[in-house]
Image (cartoon, coloured by chain):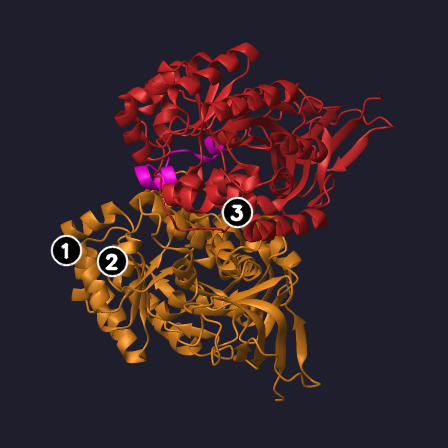
Chain colours: A orange, B red
Amino acid sequence: MKSSKTIIKGGRFLISGTDEPVLSGYMTIEDDLITYIGKEEPLMEDDVQVVDGSRLLFMPGLVNTHGHAAMSLLRGYGDDLALQVWLQEKMWPMEAKFTGEDVYWGTSLSVLEMLKGGTTTFLDMYDHMDRVAEVVELSGIRSVLMRGVIGLCPEEVQNHKLAEAISFARNWHGKADGRITTMISPHAPYTCPPDFFVKFVQAAHDLDLPMHTHMSETKREVEQNVVDYGLRPVAHLEKLGMFTRPSIVAHGVHLNDEEIEILARHDVGVSHNPGSNLKLASGVARVTDLLKAGVKVSLGTDGAASNNNLDMFEEMRLAALIHKGVSGDPTAVPAPEALRIATEYGAKSIFLNDVGRLAVGMKADFIAIDIDQPHLLPHTDLLSHAVYSASAKDVEHVWVNGKQVVKHGECITLDEEAIRRKAQESFDGLLKR
Amino acid sequence: MKSSKTIIKGGRFLISGTDEPVLSGYMTIEDDLITYIGKEEPLMEDDVQVVDGSRLLFMPGLVNTHGHAAMSLLRGYGDDLALQVWLQEKMWPMEAKFTGEDVYWGTSLSVLEMLKGGTTTFLDMYDHMDRVAEVVELSGIRSVLMRGVIGLCPEEVQNHKLAEAISFARNWHGKADGRITTMISPHAPYTCPPDFFVKFVQAAHDLDLPMHTHMSETKREVEQNVVDYGLRPVAHLEKLGMFTRPSIVAHGVHLNDEEIEILARHDVGVSHNPGSNLKLASGVARVTDLLKAGVKVSLGTDGAASNNNLDMFEEMRLAALIHKGVSGDPTAVPAPEALRIATEYGAKSIFLNDVGRLAVGMKADFIAIDIDQPHLLPHTDLLSHAVYSASAKDVEHVWVNGKQVVKHGECITLDEEAIRRKAQESFDGLLKR
């Protein structure tokens, strides 16, 4: 195959962690990689595609490290309720009716929303994962996928689900030009008995894959873990061997100092889900303490049913705002750190080491936001604007793995009209069944 | 003048506080008023302008009850700093250089952002207020304006500022077809000595106007008030007579039970500024306690330099989210209440009793959001979507006082191109001077 080459000309670029975080200049993309970024104009060969970068701020694509894409079908179906009530009375009864078709359209709706909003990588833990992978293949997005297994069922059903999780992880790892990787994912310590949980640890070893689970989202769940197993969730999962695998846990709201130390020691990532945690009144995670301890903190939207959108700019801003307000320290999670949490740390947390920064040799997963708008003017500090002022709808263009997937705000890989219609039909069907 | 008549046909309408909060049907606007809203199709006369309401959700325009519009010129100029450092080292030195021209363009930038984002009324406390009023006249927005006076200066200068505040309030009250009302506004108890503050109370009595001030934004400010005057700010302002006038205070973050009781007794409104309070690490206001005590709570963005945008959907969502997360009660500030805080309570807080709801006899200040978008589907609960999923950029049309000011996302009363250019030039000029 002939290689493709694109040059962004005259743009502004967010270069994380350098003295000059906003670079004015050029970026070259060859096939799926960034091959140049700098102030000097690169050689413009004849067959190069040139993109006019004026009016645009280029930044790494946002990385969403925890979610359940198909749950967008239940957006707005049950708000202002406690987590357990919301799960047991609203979500689980509806989700039990989800077919592969529902998952396909719900995931399509979410991937459409995420791509248009500048998210280039998402982690998804759900059921009917073959259908999720189909959407990923078609849409051009990057993802880390896993069958999330709830083990509150007879052993026979447990084993069937485990086999499904293993087979999915094996079949899809590395697929879609490498855009799909997989993990092994028991749903949570409170939904998977210890003897079942350890089978996932074994499977992760056998397949040499990382692990993901929900952990310490609510106070009640932590207390129940102590009642049931005599240990808080972190020590419990450590005992079950999960942290012998590269791991990332979702939420981590209720952690004591000792638990933070254990997570740091095992290099376990924490997917911080501020919107969902606030909405379900789960609490405010100890993000500044986690960062101080050297824990990889990243951001997740969780499902759209508890958020209620998949705007990663909003999560980034929430992370930058709430920890200031709650701690009383206005320097907590400053803008450059919030941006890294939403990009670079996110990628590292899900074990993608060539994603999350604009730099030579990295995968060309990047987005452009239109900065010539009232709420992004004047141009005082564009990094600040990206974190504190922008939103999903400011995204003008998106590239994943070197290929453009959103152009002038329109997703060019998916049929938006059909997805909108089918998503509504799916929800209407769920209500009727 | 011949009367104008517009009928919205086949739309969805958010009707606050009723059994059926989302009504499908029609709304008639005659001149500046809503004259019909209901399920039955009204008579379509020949000279009626008909607006197709399909794909749109109509809701009251958002009411921003605290801000400093011209400060948008300093958006992103100083982040992640403590309030006093930010004010004294960043804001005040730059603001001292503001000319009337700077205020005009900064305010234009903010009004443009607010109108496009669905805010139809804003309160503004600043300097060079004649230039602010000019922008309001031209743009078609509704506003409550006041010269905010900092009294840390010689008596001669104090008196000059007071005279300016009085003359502005007298000259502009009721102007621009009644879209402008005015208030009397000493900046804060910590910037206005008591003998100076009471002159404003007297002026408010003389002119029969309400009062507005910053109050109890930071813990330090409350403590200093006790040191200086032997009273916490609420008792201090009560003693100075402020609450003998209809009043609204901004922030009210640090309040004890007794203070909440005093505010409730005098029917003093509190403009809650969640974004700014979080960003400056001022803390989290006791919103659920204020509401429980019967205090009118409304929402303000504060200036864009501490927010850093003027998206009232974001403030509404922050109000609905943070009080859940911090209190641990997922039913705190539910979606319908958050919507009322951002609209109806907002209007009442600034003494506009015919604004803030879609109902017959109310001023036709309303907005339409495009609900046929991925992040607003499926249509489970449109009120929930307005609060938890939407953003400023979902606003398709805006009407104020019966006149359309935003059409298909474009502001038709202001020259956006010129404002964007002039706002940048103003900031560049401030840096150079």
- Front residue of A194 and B146: B146
Q: Is residue A90 in sight in this rendering?
A: no
Instruction: In the rendered view, tell whether residue B211 sits above or below residue A18.
Output: above
* Type of amino acid at the residue the image marks with label 2: Pro
Which portion, as a residue range, is magenta? B322-338
Q: What residue is rendered at 73% in x and 26% in y? A: B28
Q: What residue is rendered at 43% in x and 55% in y? A: A316
Q: Which badge, 1 or 2, is on the more N-terminal residue?
A: 2
Q: Position of residue A323 (x, y in %)?
A: 34, 49
Q: Is residue A193 magenta?
A: no
Q: What residue is rendered at 28% in x and 48% in y? A: A218
Rounded to the nearest angstrom, the CA distance separating label 3 from label 2 is 48 Å
Side of A408 where A193 appears, left or right: left
Q: Which residue is mark 2?
A: A189
Rounded to the nearest angstrom, the CA distance separating label 1 from label 3 is 54 Å
Chain to which the residue tagged by mark 3 belongs? B
Category of crowding for the residue at label 2, using alpha-carbon neighbours closer than 10 angstroms: few (below 14), some (14–19), many (at least 20): many
Instruction: In the rendered view, tell whether residue B343 sits above or below residue A288.
Output: above
| Tag 2 secondary structure | loop
